[in-house]
Amino acid sequence: MYRTHSCGELRLADAGKTVKLSGWVQVARDFGAMTFLDLRDRYGITQLVFSMEENAELCERARKLGREFVIGIEGTVRERSNKNPNRATGDVEVVVNTLQILNASKVPPFTIEDETDGGDDLRMRYRYLDIRRAPVQQNLIFRSKLALEVRKYLGEQNFVEVETPFLIKSTPEGARDFVVPSRMNPGQFYALPQSPQTFKQILMVAGMDRYFQIVKCFRDEDLRADRQPEFTQIDCEMAFVDREAILNTFEGLTKHLFKHTLGLEFADFPRMSYDDAMRLYGSDKPDLRFGMPIVELNDLAKDKGFVVFDSAELVAGICVSGRAESTTRKDIDELTDWVKRPQIGAKGLVYVRYNSDGSLKSSVDKFFDESQLKAWAAKMDAQPGDLLLILAGEDDEKTRKQTGELRLEMGRRLGLMTPGVFKPLWVLDFPLLEWDDDTARFYAMHHPFTSPKPEDVAKMASNDRQVLKDLRADAYDLVINGVEIGGGSIRIFDRDLQMKNFELLGFTHEEAEAQFGFLLGAFEFGAPPHGGIAFGFDRLCAVMNGQNSIRDFIAFPKNNQGRDMMIDAPSPIADAQMKELFLESTAE
Ligand code: ASP
């Protein structure tokens, strides 16, 4: 009744056909004798024509249509004299015979076009208008397609999709929980899951063997550009597998997804240890779209009388190819300010220009002569014409991270993060534990259920903090273009080892029993060896589309204050509701 075709469908071959179309008025152009109107739906835009000469009454009505009015028309397809090669339907137009206004629209608060004049909050408040825009629609359609491909691949591999509960128990590990008061249990609360971690492990004990779920997770954290309080994971777990089997299965999934959405094929993903990633890139999620690895210069730069280097634990730098001469003094000053920003925190920046004529000029010429600088250049694999940028600091790890940030900044400035290029890799062998000075205790680097590497199990009995810091976990991350896309681990499946791990994390036996007794209990009934991984689904969508913000791939995201601007949540609740939930009213 409403349409025989979509607004993206008609082609030259349809000329002469009588068709019905329905959609939204994108724009109307009135040329006196003729009125042209662009009609839009999810599938595209078709040009409609109304002519004063042929049907004055209809043409008058068309002129009065406003943007975003919903109309239905019947008309005849004809070849356009003035073709639009940028539009799939650009060869044709529809000469309208009947026009029905299905609904009027207020003037939208921003333009419904690929590039809009609407700010973030306005777009979120009127998200239904924002979603009418083609780029947002394309993102959501991509997301849907990706989810279908996930199900297809994992389904074929015998994975079973199982739903796990959203109302669960709060635990102090990990991020902050969102909690939900229980009316039937006064003073008690559920928590929304940060991930289905314990449930998927229980499913392995239950013999499900291969589980997955595309699932919402909730974390009450301070929000950054790529964080949302609720986000989606592709959550997976397998029994009777070692790390190799897991990496292969999910490398296979990743390849499948790229192939069947973007048409891209990959060679096997490189693998890098956490230690190498930190050493070479100052990050556990290196962007491998460009090189520029970090090179340590301690042996060449320290104890030569330059106090900044002499007092440093690490002197390290990167070699910026071909930029010795094209980098101006002003560029260097800017970069120096950049590394000194509190977010980076370096004390200063040393540079060496390895000029094309082979001469070397540095900001530390007072302390190092040309032959010494040449030795640095050699160690950094520099060629004449390259620029060396060097940082030094009292803390090895911090300085590496700063140098890694500088590397990324240079990558950005020099346009080395090529859109459309994807560099996936596995990062392996993360530390099991992370020491926190403030609370003077260890935290699980991944989560408390991650297994140490078999060769490190015996060392868990040590009381030596350094030995414990050096423990390695059977944990892995999938990284693409500098973004952590997935993370997982081989799990502990032995009750005593799990208890030992809780002990290292500062739990008493009673606390461990109270919080995780159900899992420890399950381990007493024949738990198989198992492991798994979870992919950040929103992030995967964003990275595959070369975008930074996951927000654009979520239909109804929250803003930086954790608010849904459209429904205006969170919001106060009625006193009666508060009472029923045994909550104190804070209202006066
Ligand atoms: N549950 C973990 C997470 O959310 C992933 C995993 O270990 O499978 O990070």
Image: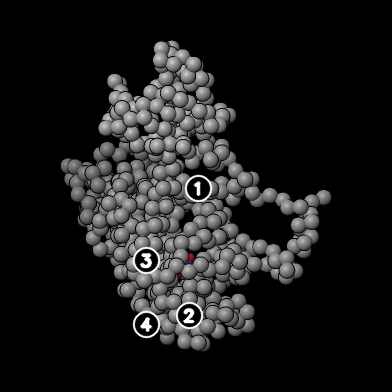
Label whose residue precedes the other's in the sequence (4 or 2): 2
Q: Can residue 160 be seen in this view?
A: yes
What is the C-alpha distance between the residues marked 2 and 1? Answer: 35 Å
What is the C-alpha distance between the residues marked 4 and 1? Answer: 46 Å
Q: Which residue lies furthest to the right in this view?
A: 588
Labelled disc at residue 206: 2
Which secondary structure, mark 1? loop
Labelled disc at residue 555: 1
| Location of residue 358 by image quarter | top left
Callout 4 amino acid:
Glu
Q: Which of 300 and 290 is in front in this view?
A: 290
What is the C-alpha distance between the residues marked 4 and 2? Answer: 28 Å
- In the picture of the structure, the residue carrying the numbered disc 4 is 455
Callout 2 amino acid:
Ala
In the image, is residue 412 above or below residue 427?
above
Which residue is painted at 52% across and 37% down in the image?
Answer: 129
The reply to whether dot 4 and dot 2 touch (C-beta < 8 Å) is no
Instruction: Classify mark 3: residues with Cα within 10 Å, few (<14), some (14-19) or many (20+).
Output: many
| Location of residue 234 by image quarter | bottom left
Callout 1 amino acid:
Ala
